[in-house]
Each structure stands twice: as C-alpha cells, then as structure tokens.
Image (cartoon, rainbow, N blue to C red):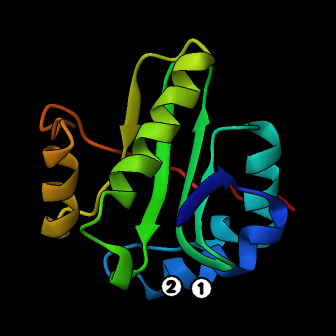
Amino acid sequence: MIEIAEFAPGDYDEAMTLWRATEGLTLRDVDSRQSVLAYLARNPGLSFVARDALTLVGAVLAGTDGRRGYLQHLAVARAYRGKGLGRSLAERVIEALRACGIEKCHLMVRCENEPAKAFWQHLGWTLREDIALMSHAARMLS
C-alpha cells in the first residue's frame, strides 16, 4: 500500500535519486540539499513523498509566496505511473495550499516535455500561452 506523507529533510537523498531518474525534470543549483531543506522550512506541510513500504516512489515540492502556490518537481517512479499516484500527490498539494488560503497554483513544464503537459492538462491544469517566464539569478557582489 502506498502512503503519502509530508516531505521530511531525511527524504532529500531518495527524492534526488528519483528526480535524477525522471525524464524531462530539470535540476539546478537551487536543488542543493541546503536550498531544498530551507524551502521545506519556509513552506511547512506543503511538500510530500509517496512510499511503498520503505521505498520512496513519488515526490513533490510546493510552496507559496502568500498569494499563489507553486508546485515543483512532481515525479513518480516509472513502475508506479498510470495508477493515480501523480494525481494524488498533486491533489495533496492543492489541499494543503487551500488550507493556507491559497486558491491558485502555478507550475512550470519544459516546452518540449509533451508527456508532462498532457499529464497536467488531463488533471485540469491550463496551459498558459499569454505569459512568458523570465528569470534572474542573483550573484554575490565582491
């Protein structure tokens, strides 16, 4: 039986192994242990893992800026896909955000990741073509 629980700091290594094995999921420097643990501390109760006995088979990060939620890095081990686990993890995030008073959630999918876009659209998410994502990496000044 699969159990979903809050993402704990001790889940980091197994989640990284899953994320690295997940096609289409991009990891960056901001996914370091220190950064993810700080993210979890700033956003308690919003990120989750799924376990089959002792094996981590799903993970998702989520947070909020106080107005909107952000869902990141949802991944399910290949052998567990197609069984509703991804949906369950996404719904758990939405429920947790709603409990914080957050009614809108965003996520990012790489443009070429058609399977991920199809998955999210199947769950009722809307592909936005009216906005462009822009990023800035702050650099330490010497």
Q: Residue at x 41, y 38 (%)?
A: 91
**Residue type (three-letter) at the residue carrying disc 1:** Thr
Residue 94 horizontal/vertical position (percent): 46, 31
SS for dot 1: helix
User: Left or right: where does residue 10 sit relative to residue 137?
Assistant: right
| Gap between marks 2 and 1 measured at Cα | 5 Å
Say if residue 89 shows up in the picture: yes
Amino acid under disc 2:
Arg
Quadrant position of the C terminus in the picture:
bottom right
Q: Residue 137: which quarter of the image? A: bottom right
- Picture residue at 22% right of the left edge, 34% below the top: 131
Frontmost residue, 52 versus 133: 52
- Residue at 30% over, 72% down: 81
In contact (CB < 8 Å): disc 2 and disc 1: yes
Q: Going by the picture, which residue comes out furthest to the top?
A: 101
* Residue with the mark numbered 2: 20
Instruction: Tell me if mark 1 has few (under 14), some (14-19) or many (20+) residues whose alpha carbon lies within 10 angstroms of its own.
Output: few
Residue bearing the label numbered 1: 17
Which secondary structure lies at badge 2? helix
